[in-house]
Amino acid sequence: MGRVVITGGAGFIGSFLCERFLAAGDEVVAVDSLMTGARANIAHLLNNPRFSFVVHDITTPLEIDGPITGVLNFASPASPIDYLKIPIETLRVGAIGTENMLRVARAKGARFLHASTSEVYGDPLVHPQPESYLGNVDAVGPRGCYDEAKRYGEAIVMAYRRIHGVDTRIARIFNTYGPRMRLADGRVIPAFLGQALRGEAMTIFGDGKQTRSLCFVDDLVDGLVRLFEANEPMPVNLGTQFEVSMLDLAETIRDLVGSKSAFTFHPLPEGDPKVRRPDTTRARAILGWEPRVSLRDGLARTLPYFAEKLGIPMPRLRI
């Protein structure tokens, strides 16, 4: 048993990580500014004596009393609708916030897991993307605040490892979905599910042929825990190799829900990647990990959450 600090602990992925470490018998200190996280995501954990919650912006130094065995750094806006509104805050949490938490890990002799992202590859010219690919990132484009914050985060993590001997891990997380995503966070799964459940037109950008690889959150958390426990300092891709076009995804969701929603097409946002799929060779070899939940099954496990949030009766799914 250990004691871990999870920044972004009230967020989508962070809250599931809190559950996972608690289930393993660890103590968990969740830290979140609530800028994009939500107390509701961790409300069911607040009475657990091994769980504590601290409202804090990690761009200011954080003091944690007592021993810590791990720091998992998941504090960052992760949706374009967020980081396009708050680009400076996004850059600050990726730079200043990451270093502040590295300082905590160094002072406590704790292992440090950094949540990076597939966005470090930008609009990739290599497909699928291996960890050795250096990316095609537009630093001055509208998405640069997030992409470069995460690239800087990886760089300072490696600097603290090399200079200060901090025991570090880097996870490059590809598109992940599941319950607790915000309804209006701008990402494709909440958008399509919400529109299909309400019977509204489903918004497709461009021609809908751009692709994503969508990993269910339970699979991702399993990969993250395996990486945290492994002896691997270099970045590891975590995501599914099953690639789907946005048009096919919309059709799958519409069919699953039994919706009659029409499709409406809009211009592709600036900087939106055309393809995105991880090469997970290293994750399989090092962690013995690969996703197991199919897209249709994952969507079926996600739908009840969104139906409840929308106050819409759960439709009879066409599994």
Image (cartoon, rainbow, N blue to C red):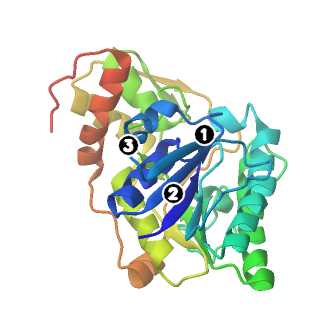
303 relative position to 109: left or right: left
Asked if 296 appears above or below 156 in the picture, the reply is: above
268 relative position to 288: left or right: right
* Amino acid bearing label 3: Gly
Asked whether the viewer can see residue 69, the reply is yes
Q: Residue at x 80, y 48 (%)?
A: 60
**Residue on which disc 1 sits:** 79
293 relative position to 220: left or right: left
The image shows residue 185 at horizontal and vertical percentages of 55, 31
Dot placed on the residue nearer the N-terminal end, 3 or 1:
1
Q: Residues within 10 Å of mark 3 (few under 14, many from 20)?
A: many
The residues tagged by marks 1 and 2 sit, at their Cα atoms, a distance apart of: 12 Å
Instruction: Report helix, strand or loop for mark 2.
Output: loop
The residues tagged by marks 3 and 1 sit, at their Cα atoms, a distance apart of: 14 Å
Asked if 13 appears above or below 135 in the picture, the reply is: above
Instruction: Report helix, strand or loop for mark 1.
Output: loop
Q: Residue at x 26, y 54 (%)?
A: 294
The image shows residue 139 at horizontal and vertical percentages of 82, 53
